[in-house]
Amino acid sequence: MEELIGRITSSVGIDDELAGKAISIILNFLNKSAPKEKMEELLASMPGASDLITDEGGGGLFSGGAMGAMGAMNDLTSAGLSMGQVQGVTKEVVDFAREKGGGVVDEIVSSIPGLSQFV
């Protein structure tokens, strides 16, 4: 995850701690919303990613689909990211996940209603 954190800090201009927190929020949302077997495949392709999965985050009442994505976006802005930074972090996480996990990322995105409008 250090490689991804480095990419985010460089491209988005946030510190390592905030980058790690943002990655955790995104992974927690995906873990709650995506098919379990697809998430297991993705997490296996990204060493250290499963360590960032917690019971926190994911938007509370807004836990799945497009509403879950809105909840995750709210969590990201509450963590201190601007909308532009949320977009930058999301792009870097998705790009990194595609590099490491291949087609499973697109399968995850298409399995969560409304997510494609955010990525």
Image (cartoon, rainbow, N blue to C red):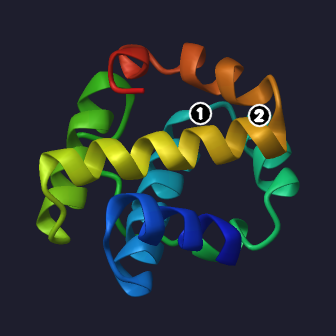
Image coordinates of residue 26 in percent, x first then y, are 45, 52
Residue at image position (21%, 36%) is 70
Q: Which mark is residue 38?
A: 2
Q: Quadrant of the N terminus?
A: bottom right
Task: Locate residue 81, reporting x and y percent.
Answer: 18, 62
> Which residue is at 16% across, 51% downward?
74
Disc 1, disc 2: CB below 8 Å?
Answer: yes
Residue furthest to the front: 10
The C terminus sits in image quarter: top left
Residue at the image point whose x is 31% and y is 74% from the top: 14
* Rendering quarter of residue 13: bottom left
- Separation (CA) of disc 1 from disc 2: 7 Å
SS for dot 2: helix
Could you tell me if residue 61 is visible in this image?
Answer: no
**Occupied quadrant, residue 75:** bottom left
In the rendered structure, which amino acid carries the disc numbered 2? Lys
Mark 2, other Cα within 10 Å: few <14 / some 14–19 / many ≥20? some
Tell me the residue that label 1 is attached to: 34
Question: Is 34 displayed left or right of 89 in the figure?
Answer: right
Amino acid on which the number 1 mark rests in the picture: Ala
